[in-house]
């Protein structure tokens, strides 16, 4: 059984034991200088996956609900309103938005597949008949189970030689059975690249995927010791030097190893400044700058922010192309995190951080 399904089952057990209150919030306990922090109420338990709509980054698609009974909500971060736009999922591993507005959802527990959600009648949701279908049949399933986790869309002109608009999907199959899968032409004629194979493989569990500013893939691996029940992690750089369809020998490098990740790894994001931010198996957010030489350099993470959460499951920018460094000119990226409370109930809110604006109407009005 995958770590994703195991942890989801544990969460479901905790959920069934405790009565859910919409007061089950998480909060920051430490915020770095130069950043504003806030909370976003969902009105329902956060279920571990989110992504921004690239056409309007103030809108988020967020997985909500409980294990075996999950939905997708559209959250307007300006008006702070939430509406359910898709239902009927067992466990959502990841959400991505294609260039044509379709959603792609990796689903575990009830279907073990990859769904495409298409708003055929343009009513703003995916609740009508025929609007949810399988995007493509999974491959390389472990023991007959496909455990799709994080998923993201490749940017234009990237150095990984993944076609712009293609999907990069991370699985969570335990041992050394997990893969990164590329799905090209997802809007029109989805196909795996390479056919029937993986872009990269050989790691244990998912730990997040993102692209640096040059388009190289930065990937996290979650490591779980089933004998000691302890977690650690690794963060890799994948540099497709020969621009073919796979990451070959000599094209992957561990930038941060288990010694520097004793609390595990759940998700990561890369800023426009090539700083990596990641959530571990705790309420902490840590960071490091990518080395200039991705295939030979290393890094030592440091603390960035802390929350009172028991576990943060997601770490995602609404727009990774915008500045996120403190004191940088706007418009700024916003980093969202979410997860479980310290009592292992799913939080009903997300937390966010963004650089403090250099000036604003409100600040000038003080003078």
Image (spheres, grey):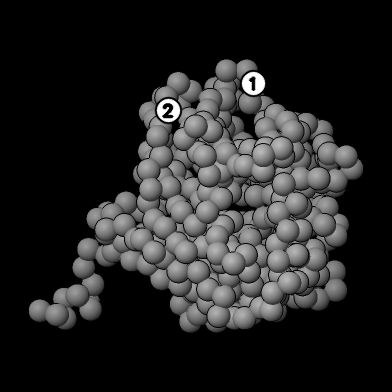
Judged by depth in the image, the label closer to the viewer, 2 or 1, is: 2
Asked which quadrant contains residue 299, the reply is: top left
Residue 185 marker: none
> Taking 112 as reference, is 180 above or below it?
above
Image: 297 above or below 19: above
Which image quadrant: the C terminus? Answer: bottom left
Residue 267 in view (yes/no): no
The residue sitting at the top extreme is 250
Residue 38, position in %: x, y? 41, 71
Q: Can residue 348 be seen from the camera position used here?
A: yes
In this view, the residue farthest toward the right is 144
Residue that extends furthest to the left in the rendered view of this protein: 367
Give the percent coordinates (x, y) of residue 247. 63, 26
Residue at image location 85% in from the left, 69% down from the top: 130
In the rendered view, would you say 230 is above or below 48?
Answer: above
SS at mark 1 in the image? loop
Q: Is residue 246 above or below residue 250?
A: below
Would residue 37 be found to the left or right of residue 65 on screen? left
Along the line of sight, the residue nearer the viewer: 357 or 154: 357
Residue at 27% across, 59% down: 34
The quadrant in which the N terminus is found is top right
Residue at the image point whose x is 71% and y is 66% from the top: 14
Label 2 sits on residue: 298
Residue 332 occupies which quadrant of the picture?
A: bottom left
Q: Alpha-carbon distance for marks 2 and 1?
A: 20 Å
Read off the residue under disc 1.
248
């Amino acid at each position: 059984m995958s770590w994703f399904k195991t942890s989801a089952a544990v969460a479901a057990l905790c959920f069934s034991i405790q009565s859910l209150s919409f007061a089950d919030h998480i909060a920051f306990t430490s915020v770095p200088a130069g950043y504003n922090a806030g909370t976003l109420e969902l009105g329902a338990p956060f279920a571990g996956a989110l992504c921004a709509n690239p056409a309007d980054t103030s809108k988020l698609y967020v997985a909500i609900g409980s294990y075996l009974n999950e939905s997708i909500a559209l959250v307007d971060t300006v008006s702070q309103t939430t509406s359910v736009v898709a239902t009927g999922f067992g466990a959502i591993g990841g959400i991505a938005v294609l260039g044509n507005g379709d959603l792609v959802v990796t689903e575990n527990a009830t279907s073990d597949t990859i769904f495409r959600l298409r708003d055929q009648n343009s009513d703003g949701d995916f609740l009508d008949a025929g609007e949810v279908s399988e995007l493509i049949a999974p491959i390389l399933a472990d023991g007959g189970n496909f455990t799709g986790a994080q998923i993201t869309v490749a940017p234009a002109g990237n150095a990984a030689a993944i076609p712009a608009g293609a999907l990069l999907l991370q699985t969570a199959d335990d041992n050394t059975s997990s893969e990164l899968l590329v799905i090209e032409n997802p809007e029109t004629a989805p196909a795996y690249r390479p056919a029937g194979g993986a872009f990269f493989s050989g790691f244990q569990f998912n730990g997040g995927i993102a692209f640096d500013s040059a388009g190289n893939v930065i990937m996290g691996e979650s490591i779980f010791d089933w004998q000691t029940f302890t977690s650690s992690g690794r963060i890799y750089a994948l540099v497709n030097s020969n621009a073919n369809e796979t990451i070959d020998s000599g094209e992957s490098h561990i930038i941060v190893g288990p010694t520097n990740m004793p609390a595990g790894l759940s998700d990561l994001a890369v800023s426009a400044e090539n700083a990596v931010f990641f959530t571990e198996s705790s309420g902490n957010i840590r960071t490091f700058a990518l080395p200039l030489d991705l295939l030979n350099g290393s890094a030592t993470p440091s603390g960035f922010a802390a929350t009172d959460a028991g576990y943060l499951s997601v770490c995602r920018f609404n727009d990774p192309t915008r500045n996120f460094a403190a004191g940088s000119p706007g418009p700024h990226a916003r980093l969202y995190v979410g997860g479980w409370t310290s009592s292992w109930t799913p939080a009903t809110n997300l937390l966010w951080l963004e650089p403090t604006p250099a000036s604003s109407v409100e600040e000038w009005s003080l003078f």
